[in-house]
Amino acid sequence: MVDILRRHMEGKKILLLGFGREGESSYRVIRKLWPEQKIWIADSNPDVMHNSLLQEDHNLELYCGQHYLEALNRVDLILRSPGISVNKLNIPVDRSKITSQTDLFLEAYAHQVTGITGTKGKSTTSSLIAHILTLAGRDTILLGNIGTPAWHFLDRITPQTLVVDELSSHQLEYIHHGPHIALLLNIFEEHLDAYSSYLEYQQAKMKITTTQTSNDFLLYNADDPLITHHLQLSPRHHGTTALPSLIPISMLQRFNTGAFKRNGELVIWTPGRNELVLRDIHNRYLKGEHNLRNILFAVATCWLHGVSEEAILDGLASFKGLAHRMEELGCHHDIFWVNDSIATIPEACIAAMQALPNVDTLILGGFDRGISYELLAGFLVQNPVRTLIFVGAAGQRIGTEVEKRDKTIKTRKKLFYINRFDYLLPLALENTRPGTTCLLSPAASSYDEFRSFEERGFRFRQLITG
């Protein structure tokens, strides 16, 4: 890895574009290698100027606040943090100068990386894979979009280390090397605020496989029409360049190689392994059909890695899921509360509603990114949920769509509109029947009142449990 960094960076003017968690990680590595090299840092947050890590560094030039983009065209190399959307910058940038932690990390370690992307399910699937591999005794590291920058582990990686890397569309945009094993879970309409079009977002996701080689593997959702469409459009699909080995994952179809559901069982076939059949798939913490698909992806990946059936079953039985993903908060005031703050798109909210029994109150809304809510509105009109609490601008639009669909909806359901998240508790307590469930599954981003879906989920937990 050090040799790759030297080749790309030594003697060059380096700009760190964005100085959050990943930017700090990049800074520490570069400073360790080149204590005296000049570094530029650009961030829209003026508080970066006062970061204690930077105070004694005299070989540093900071561009923070309103004019942070002024340095972009004064440098040789731009190390971009994933939170910065180049598409939204208001000045022209030479994109050939742009790289990232993910890009350089994959250049060094792609052959050891299992990369997971998709609009929803990335963190759960990545964590489950890492959990099973660790239980099986493999030297495993979980990193990436799930919260730990890739370069944080440079001193820990050996030739035997298996790297499980959760990859967002932002991390994939500028990569030139694909992971040895890539998982493409799904593509839904999201992050439109960071892209010029939905198609551009789709293409960013597809970079996880368009950068792979014929020695690699792609596990893909064969039931997702967008994914299969893009795979068919790929020049590689038509024989002009080499494809990775394709391993379809399906809940609806059966394949000679891949993973699918058959008569209530999970069947997994991967190259070089015999058939694996998992019959007891109901005794698990991860509920819902969408999580069953995540399990298929995870099991197929671990089977491809040579993990035993016993270790896979142990991993599935002991994995309890992640916070803010259909997280059960317990019974308070005779109501069961579930925190699904991660559900930032309509499809995720629908999946949670289908997975959980007896939902009497549903809390939706937040920051409005302009995505379509027609599918969700149609679902809510037909669903037996009795109370709908709509929060913020997105909530207003969802509720309006619901009322437009059914002019008599208020004779069957209670609809409430609030402009502050904290106002939900009295409404939920008063209108949720004892013994039933109140679910937070917003179908919208959290950025109107919160910095992340995690912060929103923590606040919900705080409101409920005191």
Image (spheres, rainbow, N blue to C red):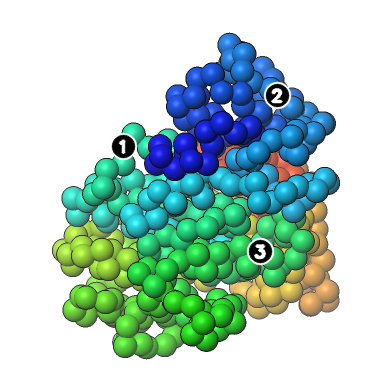
Q: As displayed, is residue 291 above or below residue 59? A: below
Which of pointers 1 and 3 indicates the residue nearer the eye? 1
450 sits left or right of 336 in the view = right
Q: Say which amino acid is labelled 3.
A: Tyr
Q: Say which amino acid is labelled 2.
A: Leu
Q: As displayed, is residue 38 above or below residue 423? A: above
Q: Residue at x 50, y 20 (%)?
A: 35
Q: Residue at x 55, y 64 (%)?
A: 207
Q: Residues within 10 Å of mark 1 (few under 14, many from 20)?
A: few
In the picture of the structure, the residue carrying the numbered disc 3 is: 201
| Label drawn at residue 62 | 2
Q: CA distance from mark 2 to mark 3?
A: 31 Å
Q: Residue at x 56, y 80 (%)?
A: 235
Query: Which residue is nearer to you in this view: 171 or 185?
Result: 171
Q: Are marks 1 and 2 in contact (CB under 8 Å)?
A: no
For the N terminus, the image quarter is top left
**First in sequence: mark 1 vs mark 2:** 2
Q: Secondary structure at mark 3?
A: helix
Q: CA distance from mark 1 to mark 3?
A: 33 Å
**First in sequence: mark 1 vs mark 3:** 1
Q: Residues within 10 Å of mark 3 (few under 14, many from 20)?
A: many
In the picture of the structure, the residue carrying the numbered disc 1 is: 156
